[in-house]
Image: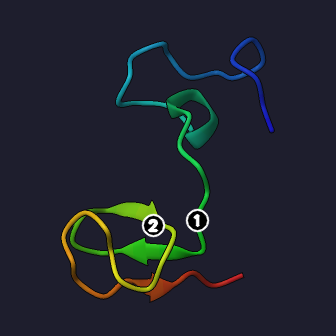
């Protein structure tokens, strides 16, 4: 995983890569929330999430 010293993104909380935002990479994607989620059912909005393609 890239660390912040080697990343080209700025230090703002919402921009940058997943490593900069400290976002875990989960196997599902919630289209409604536009974020990775750990389960098929999104814990944030309750809608179904799609399995990410490898």
Q: How many marks?
A: 2
CB under 8 Å between discs 1 and 2 = yes
Q: By what rule are the colours in the image chosen?
A: rainbow
Coordinates of residue 38 in the picture (x, y in percent): 51, 69
Seen at 69% across and 17% down, the residue is 4
Q: Secondary structure at mark 1?
A: loop
Residue drawn at x 31%, y 68% is 43
Judge whether 27 appears above or below 4 on screen.
Answer: below
Q: Position of residue 44 (x, y in %)?
A: 25, 63
Q: Position of residue 37 (x, y in %)?
A: 45, 67
Tell which of 22 and 8 is nearer to you. 22
Q: Quadrant of residue 42?
A: bottom left
The answer to whether 11 is drawn above or below residue 16 in the figure is above
53 up-or-down from 11: above or below: below
Q: Which mark is residue 47?
A: none
Where is the N terminus found, in terms of image quarters?
Answer: top right
CA distance separating discs 1 and 2: 5 Å
Q: Residues within 10 Å of mark 1 (few under 14, many from 20)?
A: few
Give above or below for 7 relative to 48. above
Of callouts 1 and 2, the N-terminal one: 1
Q: Which residue is mark 1?
A: 26
Q: Which residue is labeled 2 in the image?
A: 37
Judged from the image, the secondary structure of the residue bearing numbered disc 2 is: strand
Give percent across and percent down for residue 23: 53, 43
Q: Looking at the image, which is closer to me, 41 or 50?
A: 41
Q: Is residue 46 left or right of residue 8?
A: left
Q: Residue at x 44, y 73 (%)?
A: 29
Taking the image as shown, residue 39 lies to the left or right of residue 33, namely right
Q: For the C terminus, which image quadrant?
A: bottom right
Direction from residue 38 to residue 49 in the image, left or right: left
């Amino acid at each position: 995983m890239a660390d912040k010293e080697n990343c080209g993104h700025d230090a703002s909380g919402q921009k940058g890569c997943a490593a900069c935002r400290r976002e875990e990479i989960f196997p599902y994607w919630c289209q409604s929330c536009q974020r990775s989620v750990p389960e098929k059912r999104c814990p944030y909005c309750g809608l179904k999430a799609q399995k990410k393609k490898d």
